[in-house]
Image (cartoon, rainbow, N blue to C red):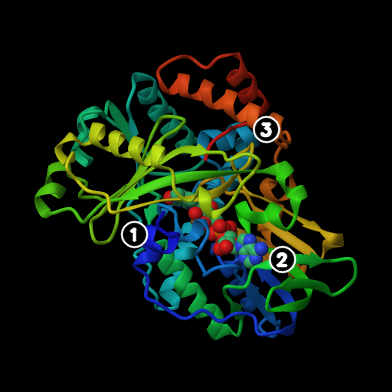
Amino acid sequence: MRPIEQASYWLATRPHRDAVTLPGELCADIAIIGGGFTGLWTAVRLKELAPDARIILLEQAVLGYGGSGRNAGQVSGCLDHSHQKAIAHFGIEEARRMAAVGLQNLDDIGGFFRQHNRDCDYTRTGQLFVALTPAQVDDARENVAAATQIGITGARVLSAEETRAELNSPLYLGGAIDPTWGIVNPIKIVDHLRDIATEQGVQIYERTPVTALQATRSPVRVTTATGTVSADKVILATNAYSHHLAPRLLRRYIPLYDYVLVSEPLTPAQHAAIGWRNRQAVVDGRTFFNYYRLTADNRILWGTSEARYYPPNRVAENCDHSETHYTALRASFSRHFPQLADLKFPYAWGGPIASTTRLTPFFGTLAGGRIHYGLGYTGLGVANSHLAGQILAHQVLGKPSPLLDLAIVRHSPLPYPPEPIRSWAVNIITRSLRRVDAGNKPGLLLRTLDLLGIGFSS
Ligand SMILES: Cc1cc2nc3c(=O)[nH]c(=O)nc-3n(C[C@H](O)[C@H](O)[C@H](O)COP(=O)(O)OP(=O)(O)OC[C@H]3O[C@@H](n4cnc5c(N)ncnc54)[C@H](O)[C@@H]3O)c2cc1C
């Protein structure tokens, strides 16, 4: 199996740089574990708030090795999976607030990279929601109504013809546009954040897996194979890997694997055959939806949210590929775009995400407030990790911020059951959701979970 550094289009096409490992015994005010978006944004925002703080960031592989170097790069202003879900999970007032915070977040990310003169191929293309069944045409209408209700302007419903004029698939029965979304090259975010953090004085060590955290007394001892860091505070920015260091966090999330393909670049004729002049981030209306986008060099990234759970909560290299998913992805692509049936997909990979029952991240502390965590983006972490970085930075420094007052920060999601019930529940819910995607009405189980505000998605 191809190693992830070659399999992920983003990781494979990034400029090479040598990794520096932790050289021995070091002290820090704050140690950050995990070099993805969350760890890097937290480091950068911490340095802005406390320029003199000694900050060390430790990454087990290379920066961006986790979800941050493997995602689809769709940039969402939604803190929950949709505005409808935000209203259902948090109520209308909080959903309004979440929408305002989410929109501001998208502007702030753009503003940050402009201010630092860095280009991440970040374009506010909008999102094209496509309906594949009559029920999803209704969903498109409801999505737009929910967005409008909570203050998003410019969202609109599209007819089948209007949808196909944007992107030409015979499967589309209608759709909707949310103008707020965007697309980005995720590894450029990682690499620019690395440069900016280093310039600020953050010490970054890669190929340095943390093997133990000892927090029985102060400072916390962070152990790795090549040295230790003694730190007053530690931040776990390890998302789907977090249970390797803090097993009790598993109560609040489930690690799942999403898989994607990336094609060869489209020729001008191939591009013309499908339209997509406005290059929107696309998702369809199924529970296990396809998500797709164009890269800057006009490749199609084609992904599925039909995520796989590897019991018991496995997050490891041998989950990085799934031929079953790749075959299903190639078949679904050909069904959507028969005019491109011969398109080749030289890149294929998977990556771990951390799902929560309310489909939003959660935050908290361990060891009497000396270890902080923020994780559980449930497949929407590209933009929301920037918010998490701000939240974690303020929390660790004990500084006030209106973000700390968000319900997603104040309350934890409902727990998932432990194994072996977890595997059983995943199987039974997956089967029920597949039946809904095949056109059936949700059964008693899904209706009950919905009433309780418990979702299952990647
Ligand atoms: C296939 C796929 C598609 C996705 N598409 C999208 C999308 O289009 N839009 C969107 O918003 N989100 C998407 N996501 C989700 C998004 O990528 C994640 O939510 C986000 O990257 C989480 O960032 P993070 O920094 O919290 O976690 P990660 O990027 O996973 O970073 C955690 C880091 O911690 C390191 N680590 C773990 N344990 C240790 C240890 N013991 N010692 C040292 N380091 C350690 C890991 O190596 C890793 O680099 C997708 C995810 C996947 C997998």
Q: Give the SS element for disc 3.
A: helix
Q: In the image, what residue type sits under mark 2?
A: Thr
Pointer 2: what residue? 211
Which residue is the extreme one toward the left? 269
Q: Nearer the viewer, mark 2 or mark 1?
A: 2
Pointer 3: what residue? 422
- Left or right relative to 46: residue 126: left
Q: Give the SS element for disc 2.
A: strand
Q: Residues within 10 Å of mark 3 (few under 14, many from 20)?
A: some
Quadrant into which the N terminus falls: bottom left
Q: Nearer the viewer, residue 161 or 172?
A: 172
Q: On the rendering, which quadrant does ligand 1 occupy?
A: bottom right
Picture disc at residue 123: 1
State yes or no: Cβ of the residue under disc 3 lies below 8 Å from any atom of ligand 1.
no
Q: Nearer the viewer, residue 205 or 193?
A: 205
- Left or right relative to 71: residue 131: left
Q: Residue at x 60, y 69 (%)?
A: 59
Q: Is residue 453 above or below residue 293?
A: above
Q: CA distance from mark 2 to mark 1?
A: 39 Å
Residue 315 location in percent, x, y?
Answer: 59, 50
Q: In the image, what residue type sits under mark 1?
A: Thr
Sequence-wise, the earlier of marks 1 and 3 is 1
Is residue 389 visible to us here? no
